[in-house]
Structure formats: C-alpha cells, structure tokens
Image (cartoon, rainbow, N blue to C red):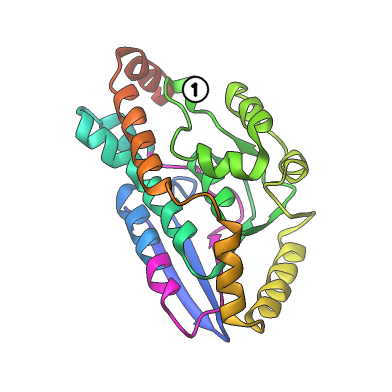
Amino acid sequence: MSNGSLYTHVQNGIATVEFYHEASNSFPSELLDRLAKAFNLLSENNDVNVIVLKSEKEKAFCAGASFNELIAIDNLEDGKQFFMGFANVINAMRNCKKIIIGRVQGKAVGGGVGLAAACDYCFATEAASIKLSELSIGIGPFVIEPAVERKIGVAAFAELTLDATNWKTAYWAKEKGLYAKVFDTINEMDKEVDFFAEKLANYSNEALSSLKKVLWKGTEDWSLLLEERAEISGKLVLSEETKKALQKFKK
C-alpha cells in the first residue's frame, strides 16, 4: 500500500479503473506503470466498450506525481524516467481503443490535470478545482502540456501555467473545455457517469474505436514528443534553483 493501489473491474462492457494513494491520490512511479499497463490491457479486451477512470475517497482526484520521488532525483536518467511516468500513461490513454470517461470528484494538480485532459470525456464536481504549480518549484508542465493544450487551448494553458500558485475553479475548467459537465455533488455526478457509461457500452465497439482514432488525430508523434518533454523536465529538476525550491516546499 505504500505505493498505492489500482483496481480494475469489468461488468456489462464497462471497465472501471480506480486508483488510490494516501498522499492525496498522487502517483509514485510504480503506480503510474501499473496504470499505463491497465489501459494497454483494456484496449485489447473484447469484453470492454468503455472505461471509467476514477480515484478513491472524496477529496483530491489526483495530486500528480510523487513528491518524495521527485525530491530524491539526483541524475539525468532518473529525472527523465520519473517524468516518463505520466508520459507513458498519457500515451497509453491516447492509444487505447476504448473511450475513457474521467470522473473527477476533487482537486487536480499537475499530472492530475494531465489525466483529466487525456480522458475523452470528463465529468467533475464543483470541488474539482485545478492548478498547474510546476513553475513555482522551478520546472514546468512540459509532459502534460500537449494533452492539456489539446483540450483547453494555448491561451488558457498559458493562464493556468503562469498563474502557478492559484486554483482555477471547476467551472473555469468546464468553460475552457477540460470538463464536459460539472455537478454540485458526487452523488449527482456518479449517477450521470453511470448513465453515460451504460449508454456508450451499448454502442458499436467498432464505431467507438474508430471515433477514438478521429478524436486523437494529429497526435501520432506524441511518443517521441512526450519523451523529449520528459528529458527537459529531468534536466530542470537537477538545477540548484529547483532543488532549493523543492526543499522550501517540503518544509
């Protein structure tokens, strides 16, 4: 449990992927690897038409990558591999043949915003504020940028990134295109998630898979692009300025 948990359940054409970590549903590298593999397996599962991605508990949806692992990086190769965690997940979601529905019940930071952006359709509650805080610790949201910008556009991405210490509301995220619908309560959201997933599960699997390819048209170079972005972040995290910012943030 120190590396969190990940459960996959398949019923009536719907696969539910649920992750948890005690540190605000953040992702150590091992858990990111398991998530990427889960999407790859479900992509080839003929019993699955649609996937619902969710996290446990009622507060944070996802606080991004593991801070403890981030602060321990001391060489370029480890830095690149750390940031490849979310790169591999985003590429697995992009290449997955199934439509992925995001269920965002609470705040999303950094990589958590990237996860929401990599979903094909996303439901949220009004508690699902978002923040990209990377600049405030001397790095940047380079790996998740393609996925986030694809959903909300360059101007909104710049606003979100440069205003690194402030939260944007769930309604702001909906207005920009990250969320499709925002609900007052988790109960209301879950009813709509279930209804929507059941509806999609009854559609043609072939049609949904073909639509998925259309939705992600123009992203064919992302395997290389996200690796290059991971290397940029891996270099930045080794700088003295970033190390000082991380130590200050830890305190």
Q: Which residues are magenta?
A: 39-66
Q: Is residue 177 above or below residue 142?
A: below
Q: Residue 61 lies in magenta, yes or no? A: yes
Image coordinates of residue 151 in percent, x first then y, are: 64, 45
Q: Is residue 104 above or below residue 17?
A: above
- Amino acid type, mark 1: Leu
Image coordinates of residue 212 in percent, x first then y, are: 57, 65
Give the residue at x 63% y 39%: 130
**For mark 1, what is the residue?**
135
Can residue 83 be seen by looking at this rendering? yes
Give the residue at x 36% y 13%: 241
Quarter of the image for the C terminus: give it.
top left
Relative side of 110 to 73, left or right = right
Quarter of the image for the N terminus: give it.
bottom left
Image coordinates of residue 54 in percent, x first then y, are: 55, 61
Secondary structure type for disc 1: helix
Q: Is residue 152 above or below residue 121?
A: above
Relative side of 87 to 193, left or right = left
Image coordinates of residue 249 in percent, x first then y, are: 43, 23
- Main SS class of the magenta portion in the image: loop
For label 1, count other residues whose C-alpha is less than 10 Å away and answer few (under 14), some (14-19) or many (20+).
some
Give the residue at x 67% y 40%: 152
Q: Quadrant of residue 39?
A: bottom left
Give the residue at x 69% y 68%: 193
Relative side of 197 to 12, left or right = right
Q: Nearer the viewer, residue 140 or 225?
A: 225
Q: Residue 98 lies in magenta, yes or no? A: no
Q: Quadrant of residue 236?
A: top left
